[in-house]
Image: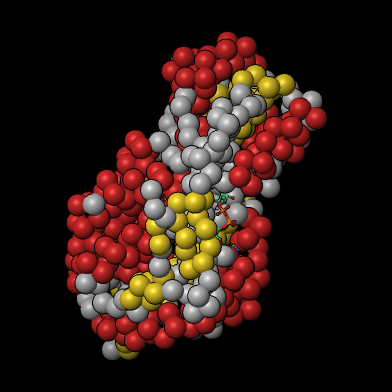
Amino acid sequence: MSEIKVMNYIDGEFCEASGGQRIEDIGPVDGKIIATIPRSGADDVLRAVQSAKSAQKNWSALTLEERADWLHKIADKMQENIEEIARLESLDTGKPWDVALNVDASRSVNNFRFFADFSKNIDDLKFEMDDASNYVLRKPLGLVGLISPWNLPLYLLSWKIAPALLMGNAIIAKPSELTPLTAWYLCTILDKVGLPAGLVNILHGYGPEVGQAIVENQSIQGISFTGGTQTGKIVAATAAPMFKKLSLELGGKNATIVTDDIDIEFVAKEVARASFLNSGQICLCGSRILVQSSIYENFKEALIKAVNDFKIGPVISKEHKEKVLSYIELAQQEGGKILTGGDISESEGFYINPTLVEGLAIDSRCATEEIFGPVATLHSFDEDADAIDFANITDYGLAGSVWCRDESRATEIAEQIESGMVWINTWLHRDLRVPFGGVKASGVGREGGMWSVGFFSEAINICVKH
Ligand code: NAD
């Protein structure tokens, strides 16, 4: 198969980076080159910013309904090509076809559809006083920078593009250099539907080069970043002195709490999925499984079986595979025992078998640092208060799940977990209207429904004295 030649999309044109250099995109299934992408830099950002400025003026003059119609048009065209989106996502990330189709591609289409429909819920806000009326204008920020990771490439990028467009902004986006294909393909769709040139500019390349140039650009008023906590710190430090609006969706080390009153077989399968879907490379995956001591042994047995039955794809890259394997090594040095997995399943490509570790201290490095791969640690607790303490011991605070038949007990536990989201007796059950985001080192700000609308606009008060 010949390599795909990914291009930048600036001012409605497919183009090379100004420096002319290219980067290889390696497929995780066999480690071979599948594509090359432009290595963009600050000059490309400047070009994109120029085109975005003029496009944004006309775009923000449209009504919310007119912009929502455009989102529907994009969603329609994506839906027509949903299998191609899934094929490219699967090629780039190595994820199984059904995950690429039913999770990544479907949700990417739905992100545009959801925000188009959600526009009907954006009410005019009015506050009456005895002698005056206030109303709130939602003005676009203007130009926004969107930076996304490799684990759910188009799913996470479209989750930002759709509300940014809806609220009247123009976009300079940078997908992960490890997974550029679907962002580039989206540009071909935007081109086909005739979205005005310059509204969505997608630039490829390395984070410290083109990503950094986006964050540094004075004309870009807001940055929505999803990625690792360390990168988030750099983004925040760069953007803060310019008073840019910032949304940071960062790493996690989520707890899965299993109490003694559950159906062991059923919950073991659900917990396996929550730990290992997408090879554990979802920021919401539960990588610390806390099981009540009275059912620990029985649950462990059922979980090992469920994990062994769970089919996963490779991890994203050779470097990431080495990082994950180094954590498996560290787990053993820290006194952990591998219950299943711990090894690689294919000689080529970046496969690691789903790995369960027990016997680690709850504050060990493997139990508190984000591994972001198919590795979960298993711990036991006696009282609910212990489970809550264990859950809260990490620096992260993104998500968590509680598996407990008694709903009031489950709610009591859930409310004490320091994280942005907690699921009870389910996982990754998403209503796109709810707030999504983390606390502590997992980020700042919220996305989803009104929170995305709020981020991608400035609320301006006009007070009229009667
Ligand atoms: P990463 O931080 O390495 O990269 C994310 C993006 O930032 C990439 O596009 C990268 O090129 C870019 N980047 C790198 N340096 C930059 C810089 N100096 N300035 C601007 N951009 C820069 O993260 P990753 O490895 O791609 O993704 C995995 C991480 O993302 C994990 O930590 C995971 O938990 C997190 N994540 C969080 C969420 C969430 O919603 N909270 C969702 C998915 C992934």
Q: 29 or 410: nearer the eye?
A: 29
Q: Residue at x 46, y 27 (%)?
A: 311
Q: Position of residue 385 (x, y in %)?
A: 65, 29
Q: Position of residue 254 (x, y in %)?
A: 58, 39
| Residue 276 visible in the displayed image | yes
Q: Which residue is drawn at 25% across and 55% down?
A: 78
Quadrant of the picture in which ligand 1 is shown: bottom right
Q: Is residue 401 above or below residue 457?
A: above
257 relative to 95 in the view: left or right: right
Q: 190 or 399: nearer the eye?
A: 190
- Report the quarter where the C terminus lies: bottom left
Residue 457, image quadrant = bottom left
Residue 52, image quadrant = bottom left
Q: Position of residue 150 (x, y in %)?
A: 50, 52
Q: Where is residue 204 in the image (x, y as percent from the top left)?
A: 48, 66
Q: Which residue is drawn at 58% across and 31% down?
A: 347
Residue 375, image quadrant = top right
